[in-house]
Amino acid sequence: MKKIILLFLGILLVSSAFAHEVMMNYYILGFNQWDDSGMDEDKDDAGFALDQVRLCWYAPDYGFEIGVNDVFGSQGNDVTFKILKAMKKFDLYGYAYLTIGYDNYAFGRIYSGRGSKNINIYQLPTIGSDWMFKLNNNIGNLGWTVYLSKFVNGSEDDGIRLTYNLAGAKLGAALRLENRPNPVTNKTHYEIDFEYPIAGIINLAGQVTNTEDDAKTKDADFYVIAHYLPGFEFPRIGGANNPDIGILDGVFKPYIAYATKRDAEGEAMGESNILVGINFTTYQNAYFKLEYNMDSVEDTDDLLLMQIGYTF
């Protein structure tokens, strides 16, 4: 345990000097320290526990992220390191941008797991990441992205995504061809998504995803998420000209979400998660989130999660 504490103190010290963003996820309730051990009969909530540390380095032409995962995932306190992003972007003389490296698939409205880029903690459905070549640009209000990924063992993933801004709404649609040209394992993924601020008060977003394969199951899942757009602040103590009050000086934004997922038989919309939380972003580049996650899966405990982060 002392080694783990020293490890994370070292990570935070180094990241404070070099990283552009540091994010930490904690379980407050619902974490099970025996999940990776196979000892189902000895399950025991461990209470407050650190689950992940994410370190991010970003500039307009590159991105690099490291995730330190499963910090308390087993009795042995195993720690795993994973590269989440490693990409370089090139400007092709203004006609398009070429991205090379390990990056997110352009599928769905979510492109990043960084805490500063998402209102919530629980990762809403995404396709994932892989090694790829990606081209993208904008033509007026129309954005386009095409990519070629994986390309190993005679198989590849190809995809296209289009976005359009219309009267304040953000609309998106994507197609991904997985494991082409392998006729046995190939799949076709479709999605449409939207995001719209209603009267400047509620930001409503959603996504519908469909997967076509040989399995005789339902294939469409969806989610919706809404948050209070303007947020609210603590009143200034001593008047508007009083110095900042530190960590409490920021904007609180409550949110709620509903996301479906496949059940044990592989049926889409067979299970779901309900999220209720609050996102607090300070004026000092820090953010804090608290989220209650209710899972419909039988015998699955509800989760109370906390996320803290800082952008440099």
Image (spheres, rainbow, N blue to C red):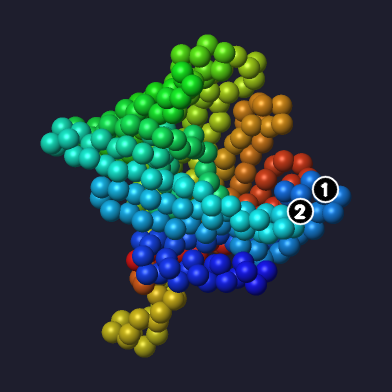
Q: Residue furthest bottom?
A: 238
Q: Marks 1 and 2: CB-CB under 8 Å?
A: yes
Q: Position of residue 139 (x, y in %)?
A: 19, 32
In percent of width and height, residue 33 lies at 73, 57
**Residue with the mark numbered 2:** 34
Residue drawn at (84%, 54%) of the image: 42
Q: Is residue 293 above or below residue 306?
A: above
Residue 269, placed above or below residue 117: above
**21 lies above or below 213:** below
Mark 2 residue type: Trp
Instruction: Tell me which numbered mark, 1 or 2, is placed earlier along the sequence.
Output: 2
Q: Secondary structure at mark 2?
A: loop
**Residue bearing the label numbered 1:** 40
Q: Farthest top residue?
A: 183
Residue 19 is labelled as: none
Q: Picture quarter containing residue 204?
A: top left
